[in-house]
Amino acid sequence: MELTISGIAKRFGAVEALRGVTLAVQPGEFFAILGPSGAGKTTLLRIIAGIDKPDDGTVLIDRRDLSQIPVRSRNTAMVFQTFALYPHLSTFENLAYPLREARVPGDEIKRRVGEIAEMLRLTHTLARKPGTLSGGEQQRCAIGRALVRRPQLLLLDEPLTNLDAKLRHDTRAEFKRLHRELKTTTIVYATPDQLEALSMGARVGVLNHGKIVQVGTPSDLYEMPGDDFVASLVGDPPINLVPGTLRAGAGGPSIDMPFLGLDAAPWRKSLNGFPAGTRLKVGLRPQAIWPRGGSEKGPVFPARVFLTEPLGDVTILDIVVGGDTRLRMVLPQEQAYKIAVNDAIECSIDLEQVCLFTQDTGTAISRAGVEAAA
């Protein structure tokens, strides 16, 4: 099922929940919508499902306008953040409920519930009530209740929020397996968690203050963020954003940061229209900063270690540079174990992983021949 959203707007009193959302989801695609709390994710999914009506814009499924089509006839299903299972019904009856409402014959109900239960590994729970199920089993039961209708479009609204960390990890893998087995079902998955969005979505749409600000593959969003918001949202730990000033010189433009001067040659063509003295933001990924080791790819600067956060295979280091500028860097544990708090170290930057943004709007300034995904 192909989903096309054009200019969707929605207001709740003085609050603009959605402001001209436009995007296209391909048939059979796993599409993730990533955005912080309050960005408009749930409102957008409810409008696609037909629960809410937009103030403006259209929702097309396979090029048909669904504005006048009732919810039951849209061949879509939605799983909410709260699983909303019927506590007095067994797993079997929870799964069968949509089919009973549609007056499907009893033999067909039994067969389809059995198929869904096997697919979601719930067969052993069919006689049990929701209160006796684990969080993961309840979540799979809620998904099964949506899938048993065989929808062409499945909408998932932050379905892993109420699960613990290990269960979220396991369930992400289950979603990818489920999508492979469903084959033709289009999935739209809304989440504030960048790990969920990047690990599951073939493409990701970033939603901010009711607008889609960028759509692209996970690698597009990480390597070519369209603005400083996307850059800060995608990547763990978050990108370091440092103020910079554009300088002109005989050898070409450069960028002055509080602790380092940076050659602006990679952005020279894009910076042609910017006068000297323009304020900029320099994005330094934590993975792009390394202790000096003799094979530097970029400039070198002194730093002092403020804090270390061992995470097992890697360690996050908080460092202080240029007096009071704080940066974060990530190192493999075998390299980080030699570094302690208050150590003076020299670091280098991999220029290929540096991003540049305007100070006023946060828009990305592209490198020569490189453009952010639209």
Image: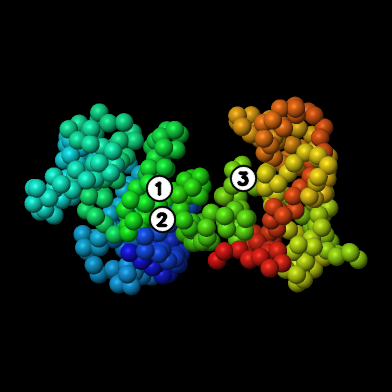
Residue 300 is situated, as x and y percent measured from the top left of the image, at: 83, 45
Work out which quarter of the rendered image holds the N terminus and state it: bottom left
Label 2 amino acid? Phe
Say which amino acid is labelled 3: Pro
Does residue 315 lie above or below 219 as drawn? above
Res 22 seen here = yes
- Tell me what residue is drawn at x 69 percent, y 56 percent: 355
Q: CA distance from mark 2 to mark 1?
A: 9 Å
Mark 1 to mark 3 CA distance (whole Å):
25 Å
Asked whether the viewer can see residue 209, the reply is no
Percent from the top left, x then y, of residue 109? 13, 48
Question: Mark 3 sits on what residue?
Answer: 238
Could you tell me how far apart the alpha carbons at marks 2 and 3 are, in whole angstroms?
Answer: 25 Å
Q: Amino acid at mark 1?
A: Lys
Q: Which residue is mark 1?
A: 176
Q: Earlier in the sequence, mark 1 or mark 3?
A: 1
Instruction: Give the x, y percent position of residue 192.
Output: 47, 47
Quadrant of residue 319 within the rendered picture: top right
Label ID, residue 30: 2
SS at circle 3 = loop
Query: Are circles 2 and 3 on residues that touch, CB within 8 Å?
Result: no
Say if mark 2 contacts mark 1, CB within 8 Å: yes
Sequence-wise, the earlier of marks 2 and 3 is 2
> Where does the image place residue 74, in percent across and percent down from the top left?
25, 63
Callout 1–callout 3 Cβ contact below 8 Å: no
Between disc 2 and disc 1, whose residue precedes? 2
